[in-house]
Image: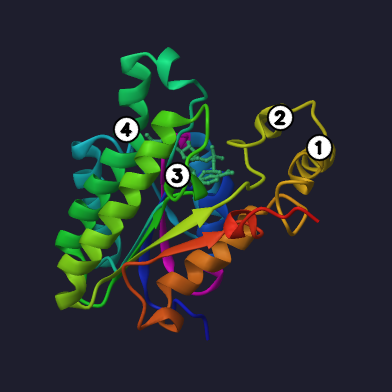
Amino acid sequence: MGKLDGRVVIVTGAARGQGEQEARLFAAEGARVVVADVLDDRGEALAKEIGARYVHLDVGREDDWQAAVTVTKDAYGHVDGLVNNAGILRFNSLLDTPLDEFMRVVQVNQVGCFLGIRAVAREMADGGTIVNTASYTGLTGMAAVGAYAATKHAVLGLTRVAALELAGRGIRVNAVCPGAIDTAMSNPARLDPDADPGETARGLDRLYRKLVPLGRVGQPEEVARLALFLTSEDSSYITGQPFVIDGGWLAGVSVI
Ligand code: NAD
């Protein structure tokens, strides 16, 4: 018996990275998964492989959310879970960030999370779950990612308010706060067909060995297992909380 048998879960940004691993794990645990992304070819191929549905969804677009919820309900009759995973990162100092770049990050990471909560929770069966993807930069500052960090702080605010407002229907809302995870976002070489993924992962490990107490970068499968916990009944008494998954990075500074 799977941990998500009979549940219908939409995962955004599921064509690759953490969202892909979440979709794979949820399907393996018995969920009927809706893979949602803007990368149609990858998303469709993944959905076919794991027996899921694919829907084109730009999370920053209200009309796309309406269509995604309609497709989900037409296909499966109900929706019980949402993983707001889609996100983008831009590196820039605050003083050099053009307004349109700042607004694009807000539109995807923050507005996308709000639109997802609103569109899906309106249609969700009582007792549903929402997992929002924040970041360790939702809990602390990090130079050169000001727009991104601001939106991830906002995702935690949305998580807490949604948890309060939806608790009466038994809908639980939590957030994952990953540290450095080996995906295309933190490791763009993963998108280079000529790069050796093992070598680029080892490069990331070298970079993070000194910063992260556990001495390595995290893997998207590890975040997927946390998202599964928060989507399943294993977390039945937990709502409104951020869950840091960062190899100990935020625990403090180690001087030994
Ligand atoms: P990734 O870049 O591999 O995956 C992001 C996915 O989101 C892609 O499939 C992309 O197509 C999709 N996406 C981007 N814009 C979209 C939009 N407008 N609508 C729908 N889908 C869209 O990166 P990842 O590491 O898998 O990122 C997943 C989440 O984890 C993001 O929210 C990211 O901010 C967060 N995060 C990542 C790290 C890390 O180190 N990788 C750390 C902390 C938090």
Q: What is the CA distance from the residue labelled 3 to the residue labelled 2?
A: 19 Å
Labelled pair 2, 1 in contact (Cβ < 8 Å):
yes
Tell me residue 209's x, y (percent).
78, 48
Do tag 4 and tag 2 residues touch (Cβ < 8 Å)? Answer: no
Tell me which numbered mark, 1 or 3, is placed earlier along the sequence. Answer: 3
Inspect the magenta stretch and tell me whether residue 127 lies in it.
no
Q: Image quadrant of residue 58? A: top left
Q: Residue 122 location, x and y as percent? A: 14, 60
Relative to 230, is 222 above or below? Answer: above
Numbered tag placed on residue 189 in the rendering: 2
Q: Nearer the viewer, mark 1 or mark 3?
A: 1
Mark 4 Cα-neighbour bin, 10 Å: few <14, some 14–19, many ≥20: many
Secondary element at image label 3: loop
Is 28 magenta? The answer is yes
Give how far apart the Cα atoms at labels 2 and 1 are.
10 Å
The Cα–Cα distance between marks 4 and 3, rounded to whole angstroms, is: 16 Å
Choose mark 2 or mark 1, whichever is in front. 1
User: Which residue is denoted by mark 1 in the rendering?
Assistant: 203
Dot 4 corresponds to which residue?
106
Asked whether mark 1 and ligand 1 are closer than 8 Å, the reply comes as no
Residue type, numbered disc 4: Val
Task: Determine the residue positioned at 19% across, 52% down.
Answer: 119
Q: Which residues are magenta?
A: 27-40
In the image shown, does 148 or 196 lie closer to the viewer? Answer: 148
Left or right of residue 217, residue 252 in this image: left
For disc 3, the marked residue is 13
Does the image show residue 56? Answer: no
The relative height of residue 163 versus residue 207 in the rendered view (above or below) is below
Crowding at label 1, few (<14), some or many (≥20) Cα neighbours within 10 Å?
Answer: some
Q: CA distance from mark 1 to mark 3?
A: 25 Å
Q: Residue at x 63, y 42 (%)?
A: 183
Tag 2 secondary structure:
helix
